[in-house]
Image (cartoon, rainbow, N blue to C red):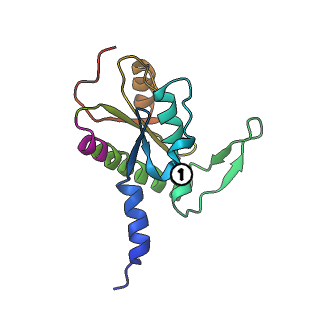
Amino acid sequence: MSGISLSLAIEAAGIFWPAFVEVDGCVLLAREVPDPATIRHRESRTATECFVNHVHVTDLFDHAIPVTEHPEHGYLEHDEAHPDFGRAVELGERLAAMWAAKLRAEYPARSFQVYLTQRDAPILRFHELRADEAPWVSAGDSASAVASGDLLVIGTAADPPAR
């Protein structure tokens, strides 16, 4: 039986079980922060985390999903009917669960939300839940998006901070 190379396995392991760094009260994916000194806060720490910790599953792995540029907005749209799109969503769901488990293990006293958008392009992101900041997706919007199958949300603590 032929396996994957050890270097490729280590690279994949870093995606599945990522390293985190803390910069100015933000927990960030180490692979997305080439130089922590370059991180500039957006309107909030939550927004900073959601921007830096924003990863397209289809950018991490080779795939055959046809991609077209949206005529009005210029962003790329993925063909959701392609079998690799379903595989990317399934992989994204597993990654979201692994990232939540890693955050829970490394930061047991803190609460995080891990999100996977499941339409157009599977995108993972996470942020810490903070009492003084709104979450990336409000509870009402989150429930609606989850119910429609557009969003997966995994929390790392049973009791998020009071707002």
Near-viewer residue (134 or 44): 44
Please state the horizontal and vertical placement of residue 29, each as a whole percent of the image.
Answer: 44, 47
Residue found 54% across the figure and 37% down from its top: 51
Where the N terminus falls, by quadrant? bottom left
The verdict on residue 2 being magenta is no
Q: Which residue is mark 1?
A: 34
Please state the horizontal and vertical placement of residue 91, each as a whole percent of the image.
Answer: 41, 54
- Residue span colored magenta: 102-108
**Outermost right residue:** 71
Please state the horizontal and vertical placement of residue 48, each as a whole percent of the image.
Answer: 51, 33
Q: Secondary structure at mark 1?
A: loop
Q: Quadrant of residue 114?
A: top left
- Predominant secondary structure, magenta span: helix
Residue found 56% across the figure and 62% down from its top: 63
Q: How many marks?
A: 1
Residue found 55% across the figure and 64% down from its top: 62
**Outermost top residue:** 163
Above-or-below relation of 2 to 48: below
Please state the horizontal and vertical placement of residue 73, each as a whole percent of the image.
Answer: 73, 36
The verdict on residue 105 being magenta is yes
Above-or-below relation of 2 to 7: below
Amino acid marked by disc 1 = Pro
**Outermost front residue:** 37
Q: Residues within 10 Å of mark 1 (few under 14, many from 20)?
A: few
Near-viewer residue (163 or 78): 163
Where the C terminus falls, by quadrant? top left
Residue found 30% across the figure and 31% down from its top: 111
Q: Quadrant of residue 65?
A: bottom right
